[in-house]
Amino acid sequence: MNRRLIIWIAAVGFTVALALSTVWAARVGERAPDFTATDSNGRVHKLSEYSGKYVVLEWHNRGCPYTAKHYDSGNMQRLQREWTARGIIWLTVISSAPGQQGYITAADENAFLKQSNAAPTAVLLDPTGALGHLYDAKTTPQMFIIDPHGTLIYNGAIDDRATTDVADINGAKNYVSLALGEALAGKPVGTSSTRPYGCSVKYPN
Amino acid sequence: MTLHSNSPRSASLLFLALALFLIFTPGVSAQSPAETHENIQLVSEEKSVRPSGPFWVGILFQLDPGWHIYWKNPGDSGEPPKIEWRLPPGFRAGAIRWPRPILLGKGSVRDYGYEGQVLLMTTLQPDHPVATSVAIAATVKYIVCREVCVPGQTDLKLLLPVSEATNIETTGSSKLFNSTRAQMPKRLPPQWNVSAVSTASNFVLTFRGGTAQEMRFFPLQPGVIENAAPQTLASDKNGFSLTLKKSEQLAKPVSTLRGVIVLDQDRAYEIAVPVKSS
């Protein structure tokens, strides 16, 4: 691993760490922890800059078969387009540590986005795992939804079919779409917390 | 390397050389077969079955070092194997008997499952006496993980003759059936007493009637306890208690705590304890 990469990772990690004054658990119904993180184009994002908007956080590892289920089928890309078109901010987060599955450079991630036709608002690169630990993200995929007031309104699985089988997408109850649909209609979110399914997030050893 | 395409013959030779190079170079995914880390078999305890049954069969997983499959409650990540039986008419398969799991994973993501070798067994029972040999099939869908996860699916078959003999010969797997039975969680001995209390952040299991130096509770219900939190064991004059941190995502009260307790990494018991609020 070259020196430039090490310095870059340290800079990102330091920035994220600095932004975290306390370690919060991200509990549904409570304030979602604010964060500062850098995307694959070098742009810095703060959760607080999206105050007034719905924000979706999608934990991602392209090598995980559960993630691949939603990308190979085009399901995740479809969700990204559908909801960003309605003004939702969609942030994909990659918390894999260097050397672990899912770790990716900004350039490679941008290539993946093109090749997979993905359409998140941005992809946050979190190689130190600071953002992952802040939200206690355990699996890829794992989905979080934050409302315009900064409250966490959903934490858990993308849908109710905890398998790697693409055939299980059709007919699955998509918790993200359900929650966003209810919230946008001014209704309370029916299912706000589910057990997320996927591969473990590849935090540093 | 420059391509001289002014000569069609040299261009096609170059193309052939390049094609051959790509085919025989390792890492070209289209050519290399998938590596598997598991061997899965459908095994029977006995070489033949009695006309009225029941008889024990099982799915035997043999895993490469470091690779694991998951328990009924996989924990924070992963998925337990799913077995779909295809049996002759009138046959019924019982529920899978899950041996006691081990704690897997690291840091903030902890799972429950098995490494090395594990036999997931069950009984098959015909509803009428059988006369001819019994053809059993099973489709097993599973995921094996180490640093990465690899899903798999396999179709297994077994043909068992019927025998009226009083002594039926056991198979080479019978030792494994017996050692697996020893790994099954047992009912709590009658002299033991367990109670559970719910506090703001924890469940506290209190045991009276026995001793242990080490204990771990494996929950059957996902999303109830924090799988990655340490479980503190404390003894007092009446027995000992195990404190289990509640899951951050637990929203509703839990009326009964169900799971397996493993004492001293050796004895395993199934418990279902009503929970009182403190």
Image (spheres, coloured by chain):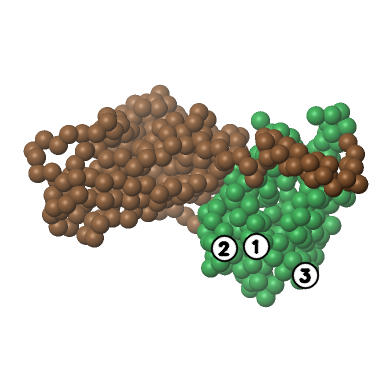
Chain colours: A green, B brown
Image position of B199 (left or right of A192): left
Residue B52 is situated, as x and y percent measured from the top left of the image, at 13, 50
Q: Tags 1 and 2 in contact by the CB under 8 Å rule?
A: yes
Residue B270 is situated, as x and y percent measured from the top left of the image, at 33, 41
Image position of B131 (left or right of A75): left
The single residue placed furthest to the top in the displayed view is B213
Of the two numbered discs 3 and 1 in the rendering, the one whose residue sits closer to the viewer = 1
Q: Label 1, on which residue? A: A75
- Please report whichever mark, 3 or 1, sits nearer to the chain's N-terminal start: 1
Query: Could you say which is closer to the camera, residue B156 or residue A67?
Result: B156
- Please report whichever mark, 1 or 2, sits nearer to the chain's N-terminal start: 1
Q: Are marks 2 and 3 on the same chain?
A: yes
Instruction: Using a 10 Å C-alpha cutoff, classify the residue at mark 1 as few (fewer than 14 neighbours), some (14 to 19) or many (20 or more).
Output: some
**Mark 1 — on which chain does it sit?**
A
Q: Is residue A142 above or below residue B181?
A: below
**Mark 2 — on which chain does it sit?**
A
Residue B155 is situated, as x and y percent measured from the top left of the image, at 40, 49
Query: Could you say which is closer to the camera, residue A65 or residue B41?
Result: B41
Residue at 52%, 30% in the rendered image: B66
Image position of A192 (left or right of B122): right
Res A71 → quadrant: bottom right
Q: From mark 2 to mark 3, how far is it between C-alphas?
A: 22 Å
Q: Which mark is residue A169?
A: 2
- Please report whichever mark, 2 or 3, sits nearer to the chain's N-terminal start: 3
Q: Tags 2 and 3 in contact by the CB under 8 Å rule?
A: no
Residue at 8%, 38% in the rendered image: B166
Q: Label 3, on which residue? A: A85
Q: From mark 1 to mark 2, how far is it between C-alphas?
A: 8 Å
Name the quarter where the N terminus of chain B is drawn.
Answer: top right
Q: From mark 3 to mark 1, how far is it between C-alphas?
A: 15 Å
Residue kind at label 3, given as amino acid type: Ala
Res B169 → quadrant: top left
